[in-house]
Image (cartoon, rainbow, N blue to C red):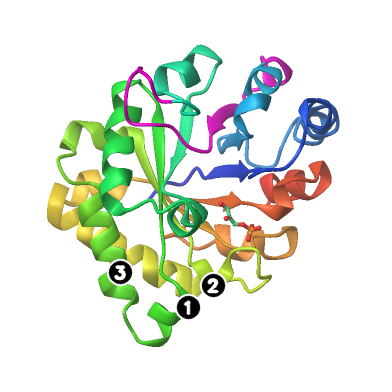
Amino acid sequence: MSSKKMITANWKMYKTTSAAKAFFGAFLPLIQGRTHPEDQVVVCPGFPLLSVCAEAIRGSGVMLGAQDLFWEAEGAWTGEVSGEMLTSVGCTHVLIGHSERRQHFHETNHSVNKKLKAALQAGLHAIVCIGESLKERECDSTDWVLKRQYLEGFEGIEPGQMPRISIAYEPCWAIGTGRTATPQIAADAHAIIRAEMERSFGEEIAHNVEILYGGSVRPDNARALMSEEEIDGALVGGASLDPQSFAAIVNW
Ligand code: 13P
């Protein structure tokens, strides 16, 4: 648990290079002298926008992340992107195992694990996404699903690597639905994940891993979520596309 939050934008498959430039032109002035200067701000645009965004955020303190990577370092893997390619364009962060990747592109805990190791190998800070579906929540499997995603996704990770990993708890039923988890639901899920990390790595290491919440975070609910001690930040989809609304979330 950290007193400084990590506020992360996931732009998904939105924006072109010109729209990305326009976003930062409007967004950066809005977060000058921001309410919580100690918080980290990370923006994760699509691959073709990364270089343009790296240029746009230079010197602003905003950090750049990608939305995915492949686990091999290089090779004949048409269409894939390596960790080193990401660092070479200025990425410091990468999302891994987003539920949309799991749902539409058949990513599994096993592929998440390989990608996590590749990200660390490349020197990136990994944000590993986990979360239950509506069906899983309704049949009381949330606990089990989160533990399994965590245990399989983090297999073979060394204690010394944990400071370079964050977790994003994103319940699938809250993504893009306007239905946000209450701060209490999110905090309870975070506590389940943290308890499992404590079992693997001990209290001190587990305590310092940021667990972000994602799923319909908006300017009007950001403060309630960020005020929860167990919630170390936000992973914001839709509301991160607009400079005013993302700035309002950053200034929670
Ligand atoms: P929304 O904020 O649009 O619900 O998306 C959440 C998300 O998937 C962030 O990764």
Determine the secondary structure under disc 2: helix
Q: CA distance from mark 3 to mark 1?
A: 12 Å
- Crowding around mark 1 (Cα neighbors within 10 Å: few <14, some 14 to 19, many 20+) is some
Dominant SS of magenta comes to loop
Residue hosting label 1: 134
Q: CA distance from mark 3 to mark 2?
A: 14 Å
Q: Is residue 59 magenta?
A: yes
Rendered residue at 58%/35% (across/down): 42
In this orientation, which residue lies closer to the viewer: 69 or 132? 69
Picture mark count? 3
Q: Position of residue 98 (x, y in %)?
A: 47, 51
Rendered residue at 42%/86% (across/down): 138
Q: Is residue 105 left or right of residue 18?
A: left
Residue hosting label 2: 173
Determine the secondary structure under disc 3: helix
- Quadrant assignment, res 83: top left
**Mark sitting on residue 145:** 3
Q: Position of residue 220 (x, y in %)?
A: 74, 64
Pointer 3 or 2: first along the chain: 3
Vertical order, 46 against 107 (above or below): above
| Image marks 2 and 1: residues in contact by CB distance under 8 Å | yes
Q: Amino acid at mark 2?
A: Trp
In this orientation, which residue lies closer to the viewer: 174 or 77? 77
Instruction: Specify start and end residues of the magenta stretch as a single range.
Output: 55-77
Q: Is residue 60 magenta?
A: yes
Vertical order, 39 against 81 (above or below): below
Q: Is residue 166 left or right of residue 175?
A: left
Determine the secondary structure under disc 1: helix
